[in-house]
């Protein structure tokens, strides 16, 4: 069967996962959150007391780690680490930092590549991440680069944290975002960048609903 793939890349907090999930639902495709895979490995490093930025410390972990991903009855992607469901645990702020550091290691990216490509081989997917259009699925049917200004992303994140009952200081959230952007874009291995054939969707000045309409129209126009 001929499977379709839609690649959505962009910085953290641009609304990729919310929109990719909704898009996948509308199209009847599988939503694959690749950041969750890096987060699961980052969590493993933290659990083992390993510095996620040091390849010499991370290398032995790759032979020991067991990462699995499946879709529950709710249709949502669940991540398992050594058989334990870590879907919630990988959202903790310290895991975001660990994932960002571990994902800068080229051997780690290579190690997690097959898992991502296999998903697109056996399903029609909406896959989000940082290097999906450039490296993981360079032949994707549609490529989107979804972004918003760091300040707008920090605002959205603060609202989300407040609603969750775990408010954080705006300046701290903004500086974390800027730091993570610099690491994700500045690394040598598969840095975050817009693929040449990707369509840019900037959501800084538009609402979530408007962003989704724009995204959906763009995908429909480009999905042959
Ligand atoms: O999308 P996210 O915030 O859950 O991703 C967590 C980290 O993983 C992020 O700092 C960058 C990294 N990542 C990556 O390097 N490549 C991907 N395809 C997805 C995520």
Image: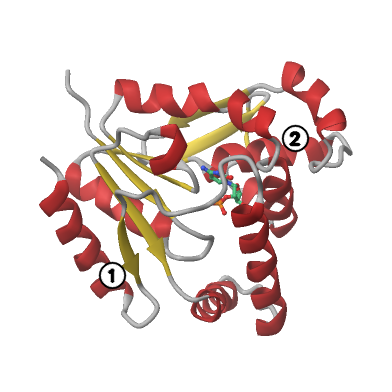
Residue 80 position, x and y percent, is: 59, 31
Q: Is residue 86 left or right of residue 10?
A: right
The residue sitting at 26% across, 52% down in the picture is 23
The circle on residue 65 is none
Residue 14, located in which quarter of the rendered image? bottom left
Q: Nearer the viewer, residue 111 or 159?
A: 111
Residue at the farthest front position = 196
Residue 208 position, x and y percent, is: 32, 72
Residue 74 position, x and y percent, is: 37, 41
Q: Quadrant of the N terminus?
A: top left
Q: Secondary structure at mark 2?
A: helix
Q: Is residue 21 above or below residue 174?
A: above
Number of labels in the image equals: 2
Q: Nearer the viewer, residue 89 or 16?
A: 16
The residue sitting at 35% across, 83% down in the picture is 205
Q: Nearer the viewer, residue 46 or 55?
A: 55
Residue 105, located in which quarter of the rendered image? top right
Q: Is residue 150 above or below residue 28?
A: below
Mark 2 — residue? Answer: 44
Residue 112, located in which quarter of the rendered image? top right
Query: How far apart are the alpha carbons under marks 2 and 1?
Result: 35 Å
Q: Is mark 1 within 8 Å of ligand 1?
A: no
Q: Secondary structure at mark 1?
A: helix
The residue sitting at 19% across, 50% down in the picture is 26
How are the residues colored? secondary structure
Q: Quadrant of the C terminus?
A: top left
| Labels 2, 1: front one | 1
The circle on residue 211 is 1
């Amino acid at each position: 069967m001929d499977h379709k793939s839609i690649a959505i890349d962009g910085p953290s907090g641009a609304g990729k996962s919310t929109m990719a999930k909704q898009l996948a639902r509308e199209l009847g495709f599988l939503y694959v959150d690749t950041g969750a895979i890096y987060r699961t490995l980052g969590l493993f490093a933290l659990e083992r007391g390993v510095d996620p930025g040091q390849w010499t410390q991370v290398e032995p972990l790759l032979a020991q780690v067991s990462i699995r991903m499946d879709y529950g009855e709710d249709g949502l992607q669940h991540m398992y680490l050594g058989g334990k469901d870590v879907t919630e645990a990988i959202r903790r702020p310290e895991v975001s930092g660990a994932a960002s550091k571990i994902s800068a290691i080229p051997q780690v990216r290579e190690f997690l590549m097959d898992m991502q490509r296999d998903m697109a081989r056996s399903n029609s997917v909406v896959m989000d991440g940082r290097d999906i259009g450039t490296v993981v699925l360079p032949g994707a049917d549609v490529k989107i680069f979804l972004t918003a200004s760091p300040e707008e992303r920090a605002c959205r994140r603060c609202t989300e944290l407040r609603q969750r009952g775990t408010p954080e200081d705006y300046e701290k959230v903004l500086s974390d975002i800027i730091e993570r952007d610099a690491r994700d874009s500045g690394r040598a291995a598969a840095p975050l960048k817009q693929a040449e054939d990707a369509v840019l969707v900037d959501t800084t000045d538009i609402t979530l609903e408007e962003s989704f309409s724009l995204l959906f129209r763009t995908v429909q126009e480009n999905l042959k």
